Amino acid sequence: MEIVHDPSAVQHLCEAIRKGGRTIGLVPTMGFLHEGHLSLMRRARAENDVLAVSIFVNPTQFGQGEDFDSYPRDLAGDLVRLEGVGADVVFAPRAESIYPKRYRTFVEVAEITEWLCGASRPGHFRGVATVVAKLFNLMKPHRAYFGQKDYQQTVVVRRLVADLNFDLTIVVLPTVREPDGLAMSSRNARLTPDQRRVAPVLYRSLRRSEEQIKGGERNATIILEGMREMIEADPLAQIDYLALCDPDTLKAVDRIEGPTLAAVAVRFGHTRLIDNILIAAP
């Protein structure tokens, strides 16, 4: 396993891999790896000659007052996990090497970043799109792997790849969950015991929406109200947003008439968690 910190060094390494005729599968992460990350890596390991992983807590996707400084980090533990899944290249840059002093260039994806997490976290997806574009340019993967938990991010990245003509395939894999349904996330480690007990309500509310739709309910307002009642039953849960939207455009729908994304964002104290499910056409 080769650990690289310098952007130029990883760029030359990955160029040499491609010139040698080997395929690269990239899993971009912010570290503090869990089973959700590792499932992406095992898939990438199976489908490519080289498994490459980036570990970078990207400052430009955190807004004022968000949890950049307290975001969980454990590079030593991550490297042990990466050895276990057979990673070949680990890119762990320092922030100043990705955004040097005179850095002035950012990437923005319009419209689909304006709602859901984009509305709650202004500038977040500009940071995501910028760092992803840089990683794709530096590491030149043939495939890049993302989890459905960050659904809006996957839509943004696919749009970025199509619009800027990146020569790679985006692979999105299902959300990995704890036994009680809570979507795996590095931020789960920041929950208090009481918050962790309550947190699976996100998934239960999503399943409730699915049950209502399968039961014949088509009015989005009624479905969302049922989700809201379930989540607000515990005062530890503070809703950021609840949404039923088109899976492609991410625009909210008033009536359920086709495949639908149900999405939630909830705060537990200073920790914000997101989750979603795709509901098949009724």
Image: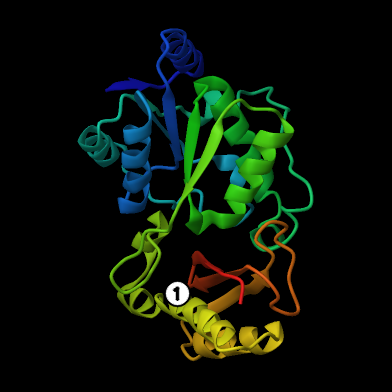
Residue sitting at 75 percent across and 57 percent down?
114
SS class, disc 1? helix
Residue that carries the numbered disc 1 in the rendered image: 203
To which quarter of the image does residue 59 belong? top right
The answer to whether residue 66 is seen in the rendering is: no
Judging depth in this view, the residue of 151 and 103 nearest the camera is 151
Which color scheme does this rendered protein use? rainbow
81 with respect to 271 (left or right):
left
Q: Position of residue 54 (x, y in %)?
A: 43, 32
Indicate the quadrant where residue 20 lies. Answer: top left
| Three-letter code, disc 1 | Tyr
User: Does 239 sit left or right of 51 as displayed?
Assistant: right
Outermost residue toward the right? 111
With 63 as the anchor, is 177 left or right in this view? left
- Seen in the picture, residue 68 relative to 18 is either above or below; the reply is below
User: Which residue is more in the foreground, 19 or 269?
Assistant: 19
Q: Residues within 10 Å of mark 1 (few under 14, many from 20)?
A: many
The N terminus, quarter of image? top left
Is 9 above or below relative to 120? above
Q: What residue is shown at x 28% (from left), y 70% (from top)?
A: 179
Residue 264: give x, y in percent of width and height.
56, 71
The number of numbered badges drawn on the structure is: 1
Residue 163 shows up from this direction:
yes
Q: Residue at x 59, y 50 (%)?
A: 153
Q: Is residue 21 above or below residue 131?
A: above
Measured as percent of width and height from the top left, residue 21 is found at 42, 12
Q: In terms of image quadrants, where is residue 258?
A: bottom right
Picture coordinates of residue 248 (x, y %)?
68, 56
The quarter in which the C terminus is drawn is bottom right
